[in-house]
Image: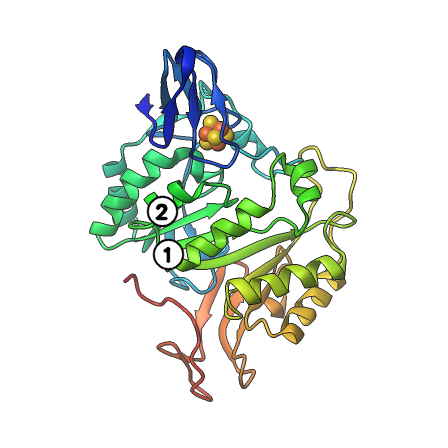
Amino acid sequence: MHEALQYTKGENSSVKCSLCNHHCTIADGKHGICGVRVNTHGTLYGVTYGKVSAEAVDPIEKKPLFHFLPGTLSYSLGGIGCNFHCEHCQNWHISRASADAALLRDLTPDEGVNHALSGGSASISWTYNEPTIWHEYALDMGTIARKKGLGTVYVTNGYMTEEALRELAPMLLAFRVDLKAFSDDFYKKVCGAHLQPVLDSAVLARELKMHIETVTLVIPGLNDSMEEMESLIRWVIDNLGPSTPMHFTRFHPDYKMTNRSATPVATLEKIYKKAKELGLRFPYLGNVYNHRYENTFCPACGEILIERQGFSSRVCGLDGSRCRNCGETIEVVTDVP
Ligand code: SF4
């Protein structure tokens, strides 16, 4: 148990959590929507501080992050719980697990950093489940990690509040955010949340100088209309910049959403082409094994810059951050600052 940051005390021992945009008011003895922030006698606790459900060393490409330390390993951690309730969750076994689940084990922030360093990782990623609800733990570990020269990555739904994101900013370098759709209706019905706070977080992350990449899981019949995808891409170009890598990934039936078929590859290719046409410099396809649109091409001359196969990558056309062929500047973070 670790006392939470980002909350205020109310009447009758209630508390109001301001960590994410649900702004839960929590009565004594109860927990918030995420299931892991608990009010005990008027004090809010993050009950999963230092409790880990999954620990692995992943290629950074698996997050996916294609323009942040390409070709490096990222020490990756997951806890339990989530502040979204997505019907198609691919990690439901941990996102919907209860706080006393037997799958949890202890790992202090110092131990996490040491594991990352000894395993040869260039960064730590808080991933697998939503890191926002692990705020105090990620903040403590990330602060130590930055002092030791490691990069830091959130793989997030972007639903944290402005205050929470500002608190993370001194330690957080990369913000890999899901843009699950471009309609509030989708966010309400499928995730139990709203779209606008996610967009606001992405804009703030950019202002706070974080590296941003977006992921959109394209689900047939739910968010795959070209009209919606076009609006989403235009929004990213206008608000996050045309050099923001956008990943469009293939849906596979999962969890409570098994009544829809996998996304046709042709749909993804159409979105990729539309993104290029609209001026996005680095669109990518994902969950489509060995597709050429997983590679990075120079937006100026078309030369291949980073070649990818599955989760392995090979930087083949870059001199530092310039295209070896035409000299175009390519927005890619090659070293931990
Ligand atoms: S993190 Fe979000 S979902 Fe969890 S208690 Fe706080 S406001 Fe509610």
The x and y percentages for residue 177 are 51, 51
Rendered image quadrant of residue 264? bottom right
Badge 1: residue crowd in 10 Å (few <14, some 14–19, many ≥20): some
Name the residue nearer the viewer: 161 or 144.
Answer: 161
The x and y percentages for residue 317 are 45, 80
Q: From the image, which quarter does the C terminus lie in?
A: bottom left
Marks 1 and 2, how far apart at CA: 8 Å
Is residue 257 toward the left or the right of residue 336 in the image?
right
Is 226 above or below relative to 16? below
Q: Does the image show residue 47?
A: no
Rendered image quadrant of residue 309? bottom right
* Residue where numbered disc 2 is placed: 166
The x and y percentages for residue 242 are 53, 70
Q: CB under 8 Å between callouts 1 and 2? A: yes
Element at label 2? helix
Is residue 89 toward the left or the right of residue 18 in the image?
right
Q: How is the image coloured?
A: rainbow
Type of the residue with mark 1? Leu
Name the residue nearer the viewer: 139 or 257.
Answer: 139
Type of the residue with mark 2? Arg
